[in-house]
Amino acid sequence: MAHASLRFPHAAGSFYPADPDALHSQVLQLLAESQAIDPVDNPKALLAPHGSYEISGGVAASAYACLHLRREIIRRVLVLASCHGPEPVEGLVLPAAQTFLTPLGGVTVDRDAWRLAQGLPGVRVDDRPHTPEHAIEVQLPFLQVSLEHFSVLPVLVGAEADPHAVSTLLGMLWGGPETLIVLSSDLSHHHPYHQAQWRDKATLAQVWRMDGQLEDDQACAAPALNGFLQAARQHRLTPHLLDQRNSGDTTGTREHVVGYAALAFSEDEIHAHH
């Protein structure tokens, strides 16, 4: 069990390149080509999709491109995602592993945040759902290229998880400018192109209103997002839509598409308007 504290990449070679140089240049290229509708310089939180880089990497890059001015400021990233495994996941699950490996190197799990989070109701430690899960892993290379020195708290949020448990966790670990929150979520799944556009627009309008009543078919990380929106309302964050597309825009097939959006949430609007 010498490797018990390491979580090895599961999605390398399928969701993104396994070769470190190819991965690094793909992420750099995606970041360079990203064009945010409403750019934000200092996001407190990002929502990014977790499909393969070929399909949703351009949308994800619109979120991560916002971090360039905070490259050296952000030291801790809380990454919340849904589970895609066959086993249903209860509550909020932290890994036992203390390092998440990608082809670009290891990302350390933030020990202090990890210990604190375990004291909360509904939170447990279990590597099993983390091992095959891509939703957190695909965000890490973007963070590795965008930030200087950071640790991560990877949290998988079960489909039946209590959004209040999510907002409590976020509230406790909210921190200051050194802490970034990343929500890893796609939007609607397997609808025809125009129907997906219409559904995702309605979902984003709901996020815009900070209405944390999203259903599972609107966003795969709905419980995580609902809990985040509770916390975001309390902290008066302002949402900015950076990019919205679906797999029909990026791969061409339009019968059954997956919806993607990139959003940034900033805390500066109160000062900006005076």
Image (cartoon, rainbow, N blue to C red):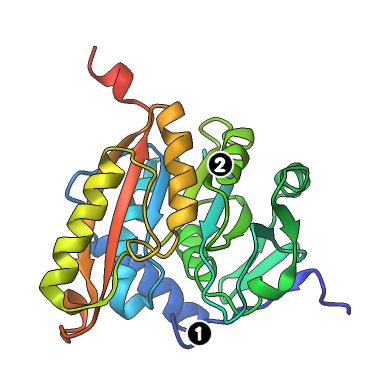
Q: CA distance from mark 1 to mark 2?
A: 40 Å
Position of the N terminus, as image quadrant, is: bottom right
- The quadrant of the rendering that contains the C terminus is top left
x and y, in percent, of residue 183 in the image: 45, 54
Mark with earlier residue (1, 2):
1
Q: Quadrant of residue 97?
A: bottom right
Decide: is 120 above or below 129: above
Of helix, strand and loop, which one carries label 2?
helix
Residue plotted at (48% across, 54% down): 223
Seen in the picture, residue 11 relative to 82 is either above or below; the reply is: below
Q: Residue at x 52, y 81 (%)?
A: 11
Name the spot of residue 141 as percent of width and height, x first.
Answer: 49, 67
Image vertical order of residue 7 relative to residue 81, above or below = below
Residue drawn at the location 43% of the way across and 57% of the way down: 222
User: Residue 51: image x %, image y %?
Assistant: 38, 74
SS label for mark 1: loop
Which of 189 and 65 lies nearest the eye of the viewer?
Answer: 189
**Along the line of sight, the residue nearer the viewer: 130 or 144:** 130
Circle number at residue 164: 2
Task: Answer with left or right where residue 180 lies relative to residue 220.
Answer: right
Residue density around tag 2, few if under 14, some if 14–19, many if 20 or more, within 10 Å: some
Q: Amino acid at mark 2?
A: His
Nearer mark to the viewer, of 1 and 2: 2
Name the residue furthest top: 274
In percent of the image, x 37 and y 32: which residue is there? 237
Which quadrant holds residue 112?
Answer: top right
Badge 1: residue crowd in 10 Å (few <14, some 14–19, many ≥20): few
Marks 1 and 2 close (CB-CB < 8 Å) = no
Q: Which residue does the numbered mark 1 point to in the structure image? A: 19
